[in-house]
Image (cartoon, grey):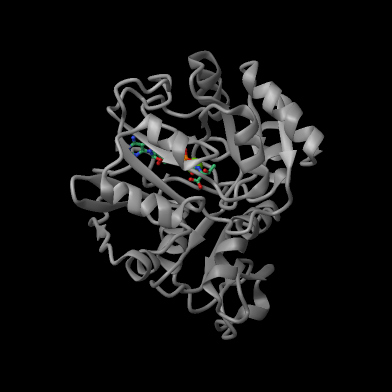
Amino acid sequence: MASTANPANIRTAADVLRRGGLVAFPTETVYGLGADATNAGAVARIFEIKGRPAFNPLICHVGFVSQASKLAEFSDLTATLASEFWPGPMTLVLPKSDDCPVATLATAGLNTIAIRVPANEIAHELLATVGKPVAAPSANVSGQISPSMAEHVYASFGDKVDYLLDGGATEIGLESTILGVTGDLVHLLRPGGLTVEDIKKRTGIAVRIADPDPDQPLAPGQLESHYAPRAALRLEADEVETGEALLGFGPDLPVGFETASQFLNLSEGADLREAAANLFDFIHRLDNSGVETIAVVPIPEKGLGLAINDRLRRAAAPR
Ligand code: TXA
Ligand code: MG
């Protein structure tokens, strides 16, 4: 079962990691399923219990920017992004350093490494106590939606995880923004909790948004059918068909909403941040009601809406 994330339990979790065990823990984005990134056997267990394709590399989490700079080559551009947005919901894909201690399995044999310094206090305490990079994908079975609560993690893995730290609902509720830094270019590999608008505003850096091409995913994990609930999702719905569940956004309700078998509103006030935080939990809840189809109203394609729509499209993709 889950253990409350108090100081004593965080120390226990750190011990479990040091001994090669798996620990699920909250970050400000989603819950991660962590292993000591320098221990290939421990990392292998992540792939095993997630049922994750082995070519899909993992994000290495560290407590401090100074640790991150030992794992990868830091350019001035990288240092600017790191000092502005770490700790926080940003992952950087960087050239691996020559003496990077991370197991090749964690980076899937690539010569780049994805690194993140989470802001969540529990995650920070855990990482600072372990003192080593912790490889952690989102703590869900591969292809299913990401967990924003300890209950979601337990529902996916039960007691297969050695230790589950419960820190309540995550603040952002949607994964980190992944940026690839190559030379003087920054590419958006996955939209997430940090918006390109914010990056531009705070650093002047113009992030390149690559054309979404499902056959050529920039981040290998960006498979089209991902975050898949059991129910089918019908996007951009402007009316509800009888028996469908409804995932709403904003004050306006679609035609026929009263016939919906279930109804949850991501944000009555049309606040994209609130919607992002509710997204995975609400999909979980509607899906668990056993409906065949979840109708989803249109979400604006701006700010966090980019990441929300990205997740929704993947959840809706044919499987
Ligand atoms: O918010 C998050 O990022 C959460 C929390 C736990 O930190 N983690 C997360 O990890 O979403 P995961 O494994 O579900 O997604 C990581 C993504 C995958 O799409 C993977 O392919 C990509 O990062 N990735 C990892 N290393 C990469 C690399 N070297 N080059 C390109 N993409 C990489
Ligand atoms: Mg994931």
Say which of 179 and 87 sits in front: 87
Picture layout, residue 5 above or below residue 196: above
Point 44% across, 68% down: residue:
305
In the rendering, at what x and y percent does residue 246 appear?
Answer: 60, 69
In the rendering, at what x and y percent does residue 259 appear?
Answer: 66, 76
Picture layout, residue 6 above or below residue 28: above
Q: Quadrant of residue 131 in the image?
A: top right
Say which of 7 and 31 sits in front: 7
Point 68% across, 27% down: residue:
14
In the picture, measured across the screen, residue 213 lies left or right of residue 243, that is: left
On the rendered image, what quadrant is the N terminus found in? Answer: top right
If the picture is divided into quarters, which one holds ligand 1? top left
In the rendering, at what x and y percent does residue 160 appear?
Answer: 68, 25
Q: Is residue 18 visible?
A: yes
Q: Is residue 1 visible?
A: no
Picture layout, residue 119 above or below residue 24: below
Say which of 284 and 40 sits in front: 40
Point 66% across, 69% down: residue:
264
In the picture, measured across the screen, residue 96 lies left or right of residue 89, that is: left
Point 51% across, 73% down: residue:
297
In the picture, measured across the screen, residue 130 lies left or right of residue 317, that is: right
Q: Quadrant of residue 151 in the image?
A: top right
In the rendering, at what x and y percent does residue 177 appear?
Answer: 42, 53
Q: How many marks?
A: 0
On the rendered image, what quadrant is the C terminus found in? Answer: top left
